[in-house]
Image (cartoon, rainbow, N blue to C red):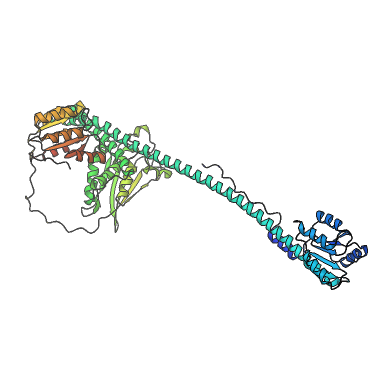
Amino acid sequence: MFPATPDLPVPPAPAVAPEAALAAGEGGGSGPVKILVVDDEPSNLAVMEAVFQDSGYTLVHASSGSEALMALMNHEFAVLVLDVNMPDMTGFELAQLIKQRKKTAHVPIIFLTAYFNDDQHVVEGYGSGAVDYLHKPFNVGVLRSKVAIFADLYRKTLALEQVNQALVQQVAERATAQEQLRLLNETLERRVQERTHALQLRDAQLREADRRKDEFLATLAHELRNPLAPVAYALRLLRLKGASQPHVERSADLIDRQVKAMSRLIDDLMDVSRINQGKIQLHSSRVELAGILQDAIDAARPMIDEQRHTLVLQLPPPSLTLDGDPTRLAQVFMNLLLNAAKYMDAGGRIELTVDTSADEARVTLTDQGIGIAPGRLEKVFEMFSQEEAALSRSRGGLGIGLALTRRLIELHGGSIAALSEGVGHGSSFVVRLPLAGPAAPAAMALPEGSGQAARPVRPLRILVADDNQDAADALAELLGALGHSVHRVYDGEAAVEAARLVDPELVLLDIGMPRLNGYEACEAIRALGTRSLAQMWAITGWGQAQDMRRAREAGFDHHLVKPVSPDTLIGMLADVGPARGRHRAE
């Protein structure tokens, strides 16, 4: 988290606000204005005192030029009233000294003189700095008016100075505030950059952790699939050799169920990873809902029968169709059936019903299992969520089946909801899926018997390479039991050398082999240009999209993920024809 951001300092209010100072100047001011009266005659000073007694001014008297200069050093005056004729210095001389001093040069001077209409005195007075000139005896009203004008000018000048000082102070304070704001912005920008960098670093770390998680899951799936392959091959070989003893058959059935269960767990784990990364792809087509449900029932039937559950079905007519991926849709309903069988005591009842509305199909699966608490009806669809059950009911699992189911349904534009009256009262899952749109024009049907008949599997020369010797041996023995000539090796270099010597028609390569990996071995074998080579298959525990793409680029014709169903393998062998003199790397 960010540390507390410092508050922006608020500039202090100026000592004298500009508006207040101007108002003071307009209104005459709050303090008395000082006037300096200079005259060597005490009687004249007394007259002046009487003239301005009620005016609100403060009069300062001086009887000589020296006293006037001393008063000017100690006081600020709005106007000076000077007598021209004084003994130590004349008013003109005093005025010149006053105008020479910077502090007093601006003070207006009114001269009083007894020389009436003496132009020389007037010129000399104005020349020495006077702003006005009155003759004795003077008119009291005129003198008061002139003094009032200069007093008002003085007040306004003071107010203007105060305004200027206040503005200067405000400018300085705002400059300080702007500097503080600039520093604060720099601090915030730096912290935002630091935080952004930290978030970007965290995002990169999470992406790296997610990448490593995906790598781990892929590696885990590979390592889990590898030991399943030889088990599946050995199981099929056991049945091929005609073992009919009841205990052997039961063991074979048990192994078969466990291999399929393990494969489902691995596939679910990888599917969730693919969905989270947005890498899963649906291969949609027009499908019959009844056929999808039947495939799911067939897949879940072994566990349902093992638990002695009763399965009550109400399947839709074949005309009810959806647009979807048949494999993924069958996986959805198989997961729901297995979930019902898993969380119910032996001898329970499972009902599967279908009904429709104008634009959707609604599949409801109801069981008599442990039920779901009201607060967990949504949580059951979360990853790694499992209902707590008695140990006697526990069937294992990773807690991802329902999460995967919901995501696959949502990819098909549908929805799923869980319903239950509570723990011990069973539960229902309602799946809604959109019905198929108007059917496309049907393709012309081929005449009966015009299709290509299934070709018999002819004996092939097959090269098997896998560093897991058990897997290589089991697969080789299975293929040999089917009538094929099989050569087995346990690393990539040996596979290339064997291909040169044996001239195989089919090469089955593991990917993660020492010395040369499967991709390198495939490219090297393709480069040999062997005469009989028809196809090359990758049989590996690596099953992500990039693994399949890399296999195609290396020159493999097929990429099969362990454990490969023996039935699938046998069916594909029928498609291996004679070499046509060219090799493709799709």
Does the rendering let one see residue 291? yes
275 w.r.t. 22: above or below: above
Residue 118 in percent (x, y) is at 84, 72
| Nearer to us in this view, 199 or 382 | 199
State the image coordinates of residue 216 (x, y, percent, origin top left): 32, 34
Percent coordinates x, y for residue 297 in the rendering = 24, 43
The quarter in which the C terminus is drawn is: top left
Q: Which residue is located at x 56 percent, y 46 percent?
A: 183
Find the residue positioned furthest to the right. Answer: 43
Nearest the eye: 54 or 513: 54
Quick check: 103 above or below 235?
Answer: below
Q: Which residue is drawn at 28% across and 49% down?
A: 353
Residue for point 75% across, 65% down: 153
Total numbered labels placed on residues in the image: 0
Residue 33 visible: no
Of all residues shown, which one is farthest toward the front? 120
User: Which quadrant holds residue 511?
Assistant: top left
Q: In which quarter of the image is residue 565?
A: top left
